[in-house]
Amino acid sequence: MDPPIADATHGNWVERLAPARLRPYLRLARLDRPIGSWLLLLPCWWSTALAAVADDSPYPDPALLILFAIGAVAMRGAGCTWNDILDRKIDRQVARTRGRPIASGQVSVPAAFAFLVLQALIGLAVLLSLPHFAIVTGLASLGVVAVYPLMKRITSVPQLILGIAFSWGALMGWASVMETIADPALLLFAGSVLWVFAYDTIYAHQDKEDDAIVGVRSTALLFGRSTPLAIALCYAMVVFLFGAAFLSVPTGFFSALGLIGFALHLMVQVRRLDIDNPTLCLAIFKSNRDAGLILFAGLALDSIVPNTLGPLLP
């Protein structure tokens, strides 16, 4: 019997369908827990859709959306593998993570390195499929990705570094369409950094007791009982920055509607938050996928409806 993984849904496809020999590697890449891939992907899709509106395209480029989806899965898996290699000793001391494949001995460190290289090569293939400016933009993120797992050892705000790494897609989509970086992309990036910072603070409350014992730092420990206020302020800034990004294009009705839906979703998260309930913290963290899809739907419709349906309307 494999050690349990706290974040994984019981009976997920890896448990049911994957060959036994592959399961530890699929778990190492977090393919049994796709939420991280979604959260890495969404800023890429937002940026691609925002650029489509700015460029008066009839729809966000489907090829780019697919490439970013493949890249998000590969690079999230590579990042998790790198994280687990570096954190294997810490993971053995934390209840939620001691069942991870490296920490539990299911995957050796050399095998994990080989798997890391494989995933990175897939990500590289996706990156090289993009325009030259986007390739350079993507390569600029590698330093942040490499150092993130070490940040919880030296700073109380590792979530900020994660925010930068997970939000790089807010620059990549725009760079792929426009082959430049402009104010809308920078505003979207800034808002996304705060969004990640906030939702990962919620996630970190699952481990706060173990983190304090092990000596790992996080914003959950930094903010403590003030976390709901900190999250509310971050989310307010996220909505403000996204609104500024939309106005700078400018976008239209559907983007505004998507932003309102996104903001209401964040408001409900804050109202529901109980930092002493790890199960609820995980559920709220995961719900950010739905918030992000609402925002993307608004941006996509702002490109599709005026350009595709507009000529058919009276």
Image: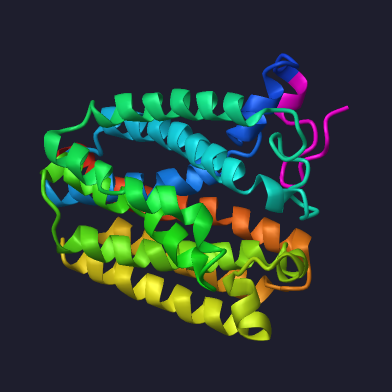
The C terminus is located in which quarter?
top left
The furthest residue to the right: 1
Q: Is residue 30 visible?
A: yes
Rendered position, 54 above or below 34:
below
Rendered position, 165 above or below 127:
below
At a point 45% along the width and 31% down the height, the residue shown is: 74
Rendered position, 193 above or below 308:
below
* Depth order, front residue of 294/132: 132
At a point 45% along the width and 65% down the height, the residue shown is: 195
Q: Position of residue 272 (x, y in %)?
A: 68, 72
Residue 284: name its quadrant: bottom right
The N terminus is located in which quarter?
top right
Please give the range of residues in magenta.
1-16
The colour style of the image is rainbow
Q: Position of residue 257 (x, y in %)?
A: 37, 62
Q: Position of residue 77 (x, y in %)?
A: 52, 35
Q: Is residue 46 visible?
A: no
Quick check: is 14 in the magenta stretch?
A: yes
Q: Is residue 293 left or right of residue 63?
A: right
Q: Is residue 118 left or right of residue 242?
A: right
Most frequent secondary structure within the magenta stretch: loop
At a point 41% along the width and 49% down the height, the residue shown is: 145
Quick check: is 136 in the magenta stretch?
A: no
Residue 206: name its quadrant: bottom right
At a point 42% along the width and 48% down the height, the residue shown is: 146
